[in-house]
Amino acid sequence: MIGAVTDPDHTAVRVALWRARHLEVDAAPPVLDDSLGLRLADPDPAWRDRPDMDLDTTRGARAGMVARARVVDDLVEEAFDAGVDQYVVLGAGLDTFALRHPDLDPHHHVFEVDQPGTSAWKQRRIADLELPTPPGLRFVPTDFESDSSWWDGLVAAGLDVGRPAVVSSTGVSMYLTREANTATLASLATLAPGSTVAMTFQPPSELLSPGERHFRDLSAAGAAAAGTPFLSFFAPDEIVALARSAGCRAARVLGAAEVNARYFDHRADGLSVTAAEEFLLATT
């Protein structure tokens, strides 16, 4: 039994559509080649005409969504090449890593953690589309605001906390309370030495440029109207200190400048990410 099915969060759908739009309108080569999220979302035929798909006003957001997925893809593939065989996706939404890697070795396990209704919806869509999945894919329906349910669910699904793992949490931290973010990092810090956590965070408005702040305000208003308000923002030094105090051995911020140098320099279309969202990279 998959369980009760609910529609995915509107932000998860929007991220998938931005990734698909990148393939259609931005210059080659793509930063991320992902059309599977669009197939999962199955939007209205007029989805390209939505205001949140406007090519100019959402240019930075579109770049950010493909960059966040590419950063994680590279991190996971490097870890797998180095012998790590566990990958945890917190707040999986319409993430397509497992679907884009259906031939993963059976010893590699991918754990997708999300709200129960969203997890059920995604499993149903994968079945309906008859999409191949790697044998090590595990769905973990859970509640992130609970003190222990997501962690207990991961262990029950087969996560071996005694072996290193890669954990990604993208586009999640701003929807959680500060207490929940702190508790999440504290749990992840107990993973075996050699584990890596990649978590996006949004800096407070006073650290953003006027343009970044304007887009943040629009995004926050839309999220609040949909019943999923932004709750937490962190300055870069603050999120690093939080990870270290939670027990992580090392932590640093992967900022916009470094991401642009990796993936966007010398692009014909001038696409680039902004500092409105950055990565915490922490190790145990």
Image: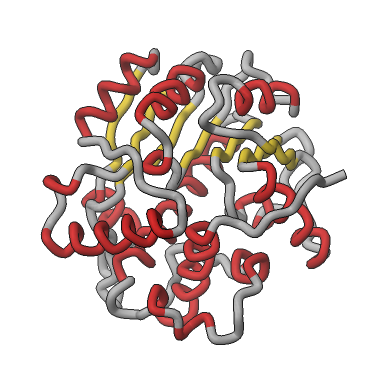
User: Height in image: 244 above or below 204?
Assistant: above
Q: Is residue 113 left or right of residue 156?
A: left
- Residue at 34% x, 22% y: name it: 243
User: Height in image: 214 above or below 68?
Assistant: below
Q: Position of residue 103 (x, y in %)?
A: 75, 51
Instruction: Please name whichever residue, 205 or 221, is drawn nearer the observer in this view of the structure.
Output: 221
Q: Is residue 23 left or right of residue 39?
A: left
Q: Is residue 115 left or right of residue 15?
A: right
- Residue at 25% x, 52% y: name it: 276
- Residue at 65% x, 73% y: name it: 42
Name the quadrant of the N terminus: top right
Figure quadrant of residue 106? top right
Name the quadrant of the C terminus: top left
* Residue 27 seen by the camera: no
- Residue at 21% x, 36% y: name it: 235
Instruction: Please name whichever residue, 218 or 119, is drawn nearer the observer in this view of the structure.
Output: 218
Indicate how the structure is coloured in the image: secondary structure
User: How many dots with numbers?
Assistant: 0
Q: Position of residue 138 (x, y in %)?
A: 74, 39
Q: Position of residue 117 (x, y in %)?
A: 68, 48
User: Height in image: 135 above or below 208?
Assistant: above
Q: Is residue 121 left or right of residue 115?
A: right
* Residue 158 seen by the camera: yes
Instruction: Please name whichever residue, 131 or 61, is drawn nearer the observer in this view of the structure.
Output: 61
Instruction: Please name whichever residue, 177 or 187, is drawn nearer the observer in this view of the structure.
Output: 177
For the view shown, which residue lies furthest in the right direction? 1
Q: Position of residue 116 (x, y in %)?
A: 68, 42
Figure quadrant of residue 90? top right
User: Height in image: 23 above or below 212?
Assistant: below
